[in-house]
Amino acid sequence: MSGLLLTGAFSLTQSPIDAVGTDMVKTVTSAVTTADRPSLAIQQAFTYFIEVEYDINAKVLYKNSSVDNADDAYGLTGFTVTNVSHPNPKLSLPSATGVDVPAGLVSASAGSGLSGSGQFPVTLTVNLSSEGIMTSTCLISGSSVTALTSEDPTKAQVVHWPTIDGTPVVSSTTADKLSDVITAAELNTEYEAVRNTINANYNNQNMLSAWSITIDGVTQETNNSLSKYAQDRSKAGLGAIFDAGQKIVCSVSQQYSVSIEGYDGSSNPIASGTIYGVITQS
């Protein structure tokens, strides 16, 4: 723009203007407000267990936070595994070696006119593996017993143990035999069939006839144990929150106790402990 230039004077007075000041000098700090979620289900230590491999991730329910602007929500579809569905579990059960159980007693007694008696214990010796397989032996032991009689010049005398030797034929010309010894080895041979029958009840027997592990379903939520598990392991945003080899433990345990009652009514504990059902991500 332009105009004509003329001589003259010009003045003005400005209204005072306050300084802006520091009223809007502020610090705005970001923050996160927290509320504790339920912690991961209590970590259960265990020594003895029945463990199977299973695709746990296939049962995980997952809802991504992008759907409704909430945290990731996790849940689990319940499932059951059994000795039928998983016939080859990993087992770690209480074990034992060389536990003696009284299985009988052979008494050697002196017959009429004889001296010499004793006893031969019958012992079932038991082993139990960590896989729950019992093995055993059944043997007779003890010191030899000698039967004695005094010589009678008017008789031919043959001392014997009928159980072992039968009854000998004795005539007036038979040479005297005034003593006879019975040994544990002879008794083991004599009673082999009986010992084998007893032993068969325990040898190579599986102490587990059946088992079942059920994992209950978990409702899909943002603050349950599965969601916490995913957060703690930086798995949030992933449906597969279990790595191969990671485990879940059933909250219900079982007592495992193996005991054999002896022939004399005695209780003979073999092994015992608390067993947990464990599922391992395959």
Image: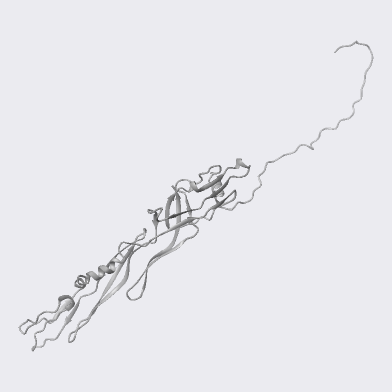
Residue situated furthest left in the rendering: 173
**Is any part of residue 47 visible from this angle?**
no
Q: Residue at x 44, y 58 (%)?
A: 212
The quadrant holding residue 26 is top right
Q: Residue at x 28, y 67 (%)?
A: 199
Q: Position of residue 263 (x, y in %)?
A: 32, 74
Q: Is residue 55 left or right of residue 124?
A: right
Q: On screen, 61 above or below 262?
A: above
Residue situated furthest right in the rendering: 8
Q: Is residue 119 left or right of residue 217?
A: left
The residue closer to the viewer here, 8 or 175, is 175
**Is any part of residue 100 visible from this angle?**
yes
The residue closer to the viewer here, 98 or 41, is 41
Q: On screen, 204 above or below 28?
A: below
The residue closer to the viewer here, 56 or 96, is 56
Q: On screen, 25 above or below 254?
A: above
Q: Position of residue 11 (x, y in %)?
A: 92, 20
Task: Give the mark count.
Answer: 0
Q: Position of residue 142 (x, y in %)?
A: 24, 74
Q: Is residue 19 left or right of residue 173?
A: right
Q: Is residue 225 left or right of residue 168?
A: right
Q: Position of residue 20 (x, y in %)?
A: 81, 33
- Quarter holding the N terminus is top right
The quadrant holding residue 174 is bottom left
Q: On screen, 104 above or below 136?
A: below
Residue situated furthest bottom in the rendering: 154
The chosen color scheme is one colour
